[in-house]
Image: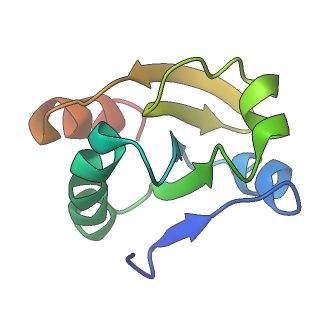
Amino acid sequence: MSEKITNLTSDNFKTAIAAETPVLVDFWAPWCGPCKAIAPILEELANELDGIQIAKVNVDENEQIAAEYAIRAIPTMLVFKAGQVVETIVGMTPKDALKAKLQAHL
Protein backbone atom coordinates (compact mmCIF):
# COMPACT_ATOMS: atom_id res chain seq x y z
CA MET A 1 0.00 0.00 0.00
CA SER A 2 1.19 3.51 -0.79
CA GLU A 3 2.67 5.62 1.98
CA LYS A 4 0.12 8.24 0.94
CA ILE A 5 -2.79 5.97 1.94
CA THR A 6 -3.54 5.81 5.65
CA ASN A 7 -5.01 2.81 7.46
CA LEU A 8 -7.70 4.00 9.83
CA THR A 9 -8.87 2.36 13.05
CA SER A 10 -11.14 3.45 15.86
CA ASP A 11 -8.07 5.16 17.37
CA ASN A 12 -7.43 7.58 14.51
CA PHE A 13 -10.67 7.65 12.46
CA LYS A 14 -12.36 10.74 13.97
CA THR A 15 -9.15 12.79 13.81
CA ALA A 16 -8.52 11.82 10.18
CA ILE A 17 -12.01 12.72 8.90
CA ALA A 18 -12.04 16.04 10.77
CA ALA A 19 -9.56 17.55 8.30
CA GLU A 20 -10.64 20.62 6.35
CA THR A 21 -9.23 19.03 3.20
CA PRO A 22 -11.29 16.23 1.64
CA VAL A 23 -10.65 12.68 2.88
CA LEU A 24 -11.75 9.67 0.83
CA VAL A 25 -12.27 6.69 3.13
CA ASP A 26 -12.41 3.31 1.41
CA PHE A 27 -14.32 0.70 3.44
CA TRP A 28 -12.95 -2.68 2.34
CA ALA A 29 -12.14 -6.26 3.37
CA PRO A 30 -9.29 -8.58 2.36
CA TRP A 31 -11.71 -11.20 0.97
CA CYS A 32 -13.56 -8.71 -1.29
CA GLY A 33 -12.74 -9.05 -4.99
CA PRO A 34 -13.95 -5.59 -6.08
CA CYS A 35 -12.01 -4.10 -3.14
CA LYS A 36 -8.84 -5.69 -4.48
CA ALA A 37 -9.65 -4.40 -7.96
CA ILE A 38 -10.10 -0.79 -6.84
CA ALA A 39 -7.00 -0.74 -4.61
CA PRO A 40 -4.52 0.03 -7.45
CA ILE A 41 -6.81 2.83 -8.68
CA LEU A 42 -6.76 4.40 -5.21
CA GLU A 43 -2.95 4.05 -5.15
CA GLU A 44 -2.72 5.91 -8.47
CA LEU A 45 -5.11 8.64 -7.32
CA ALA A 46 -3.19 9.06 -4.05
CA ASN A 47 -0.11 9.87 -6.13
CA GLU A 48 -1.90 11.99 -8.74
CA LEU A 49 -4.21 14.17 -6.63
CA ASP A 50 -2.90 16.86 -4.32
CA GLY A 51 -5.17 18.29 -1.68
CA ILE A 52 -7.06 15.10 -0.91
CA GLN A 53 -6.19 12.37 1.58
CA ILE A 54 -7.03 8.74 0.86
CA ALA A 55 -7.56 6.32 3.72
CA LYS A 56 -8.81 2.76 4.20
CA VAL A 57 -10.92 1.07 6.87
CA ASN A 58 -10.88 -2.72 7.06
CA VAL A 59 -14.51 -3.52 7.92
CA ASP A 60 -13.60 -6.89 9.45
CA GLU A 61 -11.27 -5.24 11.96
CA ASN A 62 -13.36 -2.09 12.51
CA GLU A 63 -16.97 -3.25 12.58
CA GLN A 64 -18.07 -0.39 14.83
CA ILE A 65 -16.96 2.28 12.33
CA ALA A 66 -18.64 0.40 9.47
CA ALA A 67 -21.86 0.13 11.49
CA GLU A 68 -21.79 3.81 12.45
CA TYR A 69 -21.75 4.79 8.77
CA ALA A 70 -24.23 2.04 7.74
CA ILE A 71 -21.78 0.34 5.38
CA ARG A 72 -23.84 -2.44 3.81
CA ALA A 73 -21.76 -3.21 0.70
CA ILE A 74 -18.06 -3.01 -0.01
CA PRO A 75 -16.23 -1.31 -1.44
CA THR A 76 -17.99 1.80 -0.22
CA MET A 77 -16.08 5.06 -0.31
CA LEU A 78 -17.15 8.06 1.71
CA VAL A 79 -15.75 11.50 1.06
CA PHE A 80 -15.50 13.58 4.23
CA LYS A 81 -14.94 17.31 4.62
CA ALA A 82 -14.55 18.68 8.14
CA GLY A 83 -16.00 15.48 9.59
CA GLN A 84 -19.12 15.45 7.39
CA VAL A 85 -19.90 12.99 4.60
CA VAL A 86 -20.15 14.98 1.37
CA GLU A 87 -20.33 12.05 -1.06
CA THR A 88 -20.94 8.30 -1.01
CA ILE A 89 -19.57 6.05 -3.76
CA VAL A 90 -20.61 2.38 -3.69
CA GLY A 91 -18.98 -0.38 -5.73
CA MET A 92 -16.23 -0.61 -8.27
CA THR A 93 -15.85 2.76 -9.97
CA PRO A 94 -13.70 3.49 -13.04
CA LYS A 95 -10.65 5.64 -12.33
CA ASP A 96 -11.77 8.59 -14.48
CA ALA A 97 -15.19 8.73 -12.80
CA LEU A 98 -13.68 8.45 -9.32
CA LYS A 99 -11.08 11.12 -10.09
CA ALA A 100 -13.78 13.50 -11.36
CA LYS A 101 -15.87 12.97 -8.22
CA LEU A 102 -12.85 13.68 -6.00
CA GLN A 103 -11.78 16.75 -7.98
CA ALA A 104 -15.27 18.18 -7.53
CA HIS A 105 -14.55 18.39 -3.77
CA LEU A 106 -11.19 20.18 -4.08
Name, please, the residue furthest toward the front.
31
Quadrant occupied by the N terminus: bottom left
Q: 5 or 106: which is nearer to us?
A: 5
Q: 47 or 28: which is nearer to us?
A: 28
Residue found 43% across the figure and 58% down from its top: 51
Residue found 25% across the figure and 30% down from its top: 92
- Residue 15, given in percent of the width and then of the height, sits at 82, 56
Q: 27 or 50: which is nearer to us?
A: 27
Name, please, the residue furthest toward the bottom.
3
Is residue 31 left or right of 60 when viewed as pictured? left
Quarter location, residue 93 = top left
Is residue 24 left or right of 68 when viewed as pictured? left
- Residue 103, given in percent of the width and then of the height, sits at 30, 38
- Residue 77, given in percent of the width and then of the height, sits at 47, 33
Residue found 42% across the figure and 34% down from its top: 75
- Residue 40, given in percent of the width and then of the height, sits at 22, 60
